[in-house]
Amino acid sequence: MEIQHIVSGFSPKLSYAPSNPIGKQLISLKLPSLLSSSYPSLQSQNFAVPSGALYPISIAKKDGLCSSRIRVWCSSSSDTADPSNGHDGRRKKLAVFVSGGGSNFKSIHEASKRGSLRGDVVVLVTNKSDCGGAEYARQNGIPVIVFPKAKDGYDGLSANDLVDTLRRFEVDFVLLAGYLKLIPAELIRAYQRSIFNIHPSLLPAFGGKGFYGMKVHKAVIASGARFSGPTIHFVDEHYDTGRILAQRVVPVLTNDTPEELAARVLREEHQLYVEVVEALCEDRIVWRKDGVPLIQRKENPNETC
Ligand SMILES: Nc1nc2c(c(=O)[nH]1)N[C@@H](CN(C=O)c1ccc(C(=O)N[C@@H](CCC(=O)O)C(=O)O)cc1)CN2
Ligand SMILES: NCC(=O)N[C@@H]1O[C@H](COP(=O)([O-])[O-])[C@@H](O)[C@H]1O
């Protein structure tokens, strides 16, 4: 059951995702505590709505009533809830976007297989269907879809088709990992605060259009910077300008080649991305009052980083 709560400025980490959206049925709405504590009138209720329908509700807030709508997806009750999978108890569904070798994608997939990561890569998206990441996905039974359409190719999805396809895969989070195309506004709108990217420099330095792959490391070395490292950030409409969520630092040695620096940064990327996605799947992302996202430590939720 997926609840898209449409109240301006409030998009709680949603709970459920439709496994097989089924027709109209009576469902009981169990809301995440985050939502029910913010909107006490939205305690568990029964809805009889067709799957995917927008359901009008009124919410009693301190400053009076406000109307809203909830889009409710129905799903079979087979989703077994496990509290260690975060608030909703469900393993998260991940889409990974790649354009090249996919070593970050492989790290995430391996963490999922060994169980340290409470999520599953359910689809791979690429603009290059013959890249190493796509080949790895096919070898591991992960569906591969092409976006955007290749200029001369026939396959490939439009932006709206991509959103629909990710919804059908019930994707919770979108993870860019060496993807070299601009994510369209349609996807940004559909997956608010749910799209992440890893960049091989300490943003905001050495980011933006033209800064990808070895170009980044060449620019870092040429600048004389003494440190570099990976950044994981939320994705917004522009390249590399979204809120920074996590970083790691590596030294830039005086005789480094771009390849040597790239390898040092990439080793940290593999660990950092797995740590961040583990936190995502366990609902350990919190927001500081000034809008900076933080990660709650697994061992002690009162500590953030
Ligand atoms: N809407 C967003 N889309 C993407 C983001 C983002 O932050 N917001 N991050 C990039 C990843 N990235 C850096 O981390 C990045 C990738 C590519 C480029 C770039 O300049 N691309 C070239 C085309 C390269 C090619 O096709 O081979 C270009 O646009 O001219 C900059 C930064 C992924 N998408
Ligand atoms: N600006 C985007 C960018 O440069 N991303 C970088 O591409 C590489 C992909 O490696 P991978 O395909 O082996 O994960 C990674 O180093 C990633 O940070």
Image: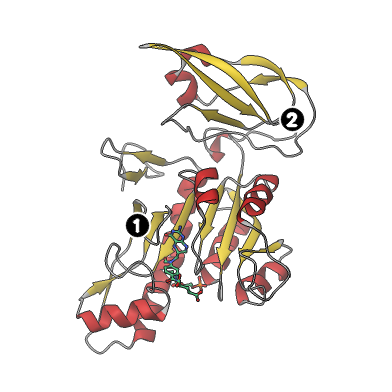
State the CA–CA distance, disc 1 to disc 2: 40 Å
Q: Which secondary structure lies at badge 1?
A: loop
Could you tell whether 144 is left or right of 10 in the image? right
| Residue 16 at x, y percent in the picture | 62, 34
Callout 1, which amino acid? Answer: Thr
Q: Which mark is residue 77?
A: 2
> Where on the image, by quarter, is ligand 1?
bottom left
Q: Depth check: give the residue in front, 227 or 206.
A: 206
Q: Position of residue 75 (x, y in %)?
A: 73, 32
16 versus 241 height, above or below: above
Q: Is residue 224 above or below residue 179?
A: below
- Residue 48 disc label: none
Q: Residue furthest front?
A: 152
Disc 1 crowd rating (10 Å Cα; few below 14, some 14-19, many 20+) is some
Label 2 CB less than 8 angstroms from ligand 1: no
Q: Earlier in the sequence, mark 1 or mark 2?
A: 2
Q: Quadrant of residue 239?
A: bottom left
Q: Residues within 10 Å of mark 2 (few under 14, many from 20)?
A: few
What colour-coding does the image apply?
A: secondary structure
- In the displayed structure, does residue 76 sit left or right of residue 85? right
Nearest the viewer among 206 and 94 is: 206
Disc 1 residue lies near ligand 1 with CB under 8 A: yes
Secondary element under disc 2, as helix, strand or loop, is loop
Looking at the image, can residue 117 be seen? no
Residue 67 in view: yes
Residue 25: x %, y % from top left: 78, 21
Q: Nearer the viewer, residue 222 or 7?
A: 7
Mark 1 or 2: in front is 1
Instruction: Tell me the amino acid under the disc marked 2.
Output: Ser
Quadrant containing the N terminus is top right
| Residue sitting nearer the eye, 121 or 160 | 160
What residue is disc 1 on?
241
